[in-house]
Image (spheres, rainbow, N blue to C red):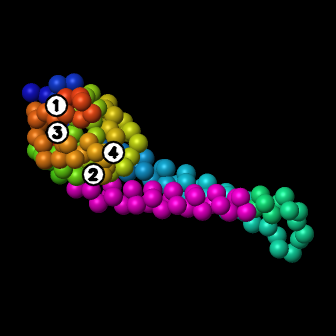
Amino acid sequence: MADATKPSSTQTTMDADAKAEVKKALLAAARAQLRASEGGADAEESAAELDQDSSFSVDEQSQADEAGAVTRLFEAVSDRQQDDVVAIETLDVAPTDVVRPGAIVGFGGARYVVGVVSTAVRCGGESYEGLSTDSPIYAEIEGLHLGDSFTFRDTKQTIDFLA
């Protein structure tokens, strides 16, 4: 039997500690993205400020206005990323035998953490991506168990990993 804490191509599940490590990696990546967005917003906000005691050209005003618009975009991205961080922080990653939020599910050679939005992260030698419960594929796999099959976009898949 494979050790549930070490990656293996034949491993079909993992223990609670290994799932917690995946959550920790997702959280670190989400927080790094948030910090980067906040830094971009701060830089654009500084560029948008004009010294009101000085005279400035129409060009400078136009650039400041554009920087202000970009600042608002960065802030919107930061707000969304903050929501993603909270979603990961509150995700229940207790071991499970059914696809649900908090499950780690594998099929088609990839592994996904259900219930979060995240770019791919590496942990324990494997790559994990977030899988939103709003995604069309989640509607197909919700409630499935290890070994169950489903069809998505005319491709038959089998759940070959579930934790």
Q: Is residue 157 above or below residue 128?
A: above
Question: What is the quadrant of residue 50 in the picture?
Answer: bottom right
Q: Is residue 72 magenta?
A: yes
Any part of residue 61 in sight: yes
Which residue ends up furthest to the bottom in the rendered image? 53
According to the picture, the residue beneath numbered tag 4 turns out to be: 130
Q: Are marks 2 and 4 in contact (CB under 8 Å)?
A: no
In which quadrant of the rendered image does the N terminus lie? Answer: top left
Neighbours of disc 4 within 10 Å: few (<14), some (14-19), many (20+): some
**Alpha carbons under labels 1 and 3: distance apart:** 11 Å
Where is residue 5 drawn, in percent x and y? 21, 36
Where is residue 95 drawn, in percent x and y? 15, 47
Q: Is residue 61 above or below residue 136?
A: below
Q: Amino acid at mark 3?
A: Leu
- Residue drawn at point x = 10 percent, y = 33 percent: 147
According to the picture, the residue beneath numbered tag 1 turns out to be: 158
Neighbours of disc 1 within 10 Å: few (<14), some (14-19), many (20+): some
Tag 2 secondary structure:
loop
Q: Amino acid at mark 2?
A: Thr
Q: Which residues are magenta?
A: 65-92
Question: What is the quadrant of residue 159 in the picture?
Answer: top left
Question: What is the quadrant of residue 158 in the picture?
Answer: top left
Q: Main secondary structure of the magenta part?
A: helix
